Amino acid sequence: MSIGQSSAQPTQLRLAASPSIDSVERLAIAFEKSAKRWEMVAYPAMVLFTLLALFGFYKIYSVSENMRIMAERLQPQMGEHMDRLTRSMQSLTENVSQMSKNINAMQLRVADMSTDTKAMTRQMEALATMDKNIATMNQSVAAMTAHTDMMRWNMATMNNSIQRPMNFMNSFMPW
């Protein structure tokens, strides 16, 4: 019996056949119906998958073609830009090298300044001693000024004491 026979024939055979053939026949009929259902799903899915695969291939091809065209158009300018970049990097390297030298020189100068500052600190300590000595000299000069003023006062007093008798004596003298 073929799979494509009508449903009336299996019924006649069923009556004449044994029960084991009957179940095999029902299995075959169920499989045939199931296969027809899968055929209705599988064939369109395979066609759809094939169309999607072709469309995907076309898209990948067009994107790669566009990338190739962009690369060809950018390549001459890219060489110029890379050359400029190389020159700029060389200039940057030279400038960084010069900055490094300047920083080294600054470090030496700062070290010298530190040494000078330490020397100035020692001199400031000496200046503190000098300040004390100058303060003592100020006191001594103030004392000398006071004594000189006393001497002036004493001379003025003595001048007044001598002046009166001398005026009297001078009136007798002829010269």
Image (spheres, rainbow, N blue to C red):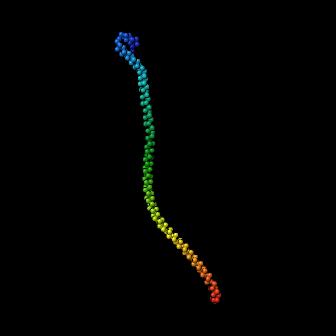
Q: Percent x, y for residue 132?
A: 50, 69
Q: Is residue 64 above or below residue 39?
A: below
Up-down relation of residue 170 to residue 122 (above or below): below
Q: In which quarter of the image is residue 32?
A: top left
> Who's the residue at 41% across and 23% down the image?
42
The image quadrant that residue 66 belongs to is top left
Q: Can residue 3 be seen in this view?
A: no
Residue 45 place in picture, x, y as percent? 42, 24
Observer-nearest of 169 and 175 = 169
Task: Please indicate, yes or no, whether residue 160 appears anywhere in the rendered image.
Answer: yes
Which residue is painted at 43% across and 25% down in the image?
48
State the image coordinates of residue 166 (x, y, percent, origin top left).
62, 85
The residue closer to the viewer here, 97 or 12, is 12
Relative to 40, 160 lies left or right: right
Quick one: 105 or 162, which is closer to the camera? 162
Seen from the viewer's position, the closer of residues 168 and 46 is 168
Q: Indicate the quadrant containing the N terminus: top left, top right, bottom left or bottom right.
A: top left
Please determine whether, in this image, residue 124 is positioned above or below residue 9: below
Q: Quadrant of the C terminus?
A: bottom right
Q: In this view, does 14 lie to the left or right of 139?
A: left
Q: Is residue 61 above or below residue 17?
A: below
Residue 148 position in % (x across, y down): 56, 76
Which residue appears at 36% of the width and 16% of the height?
24
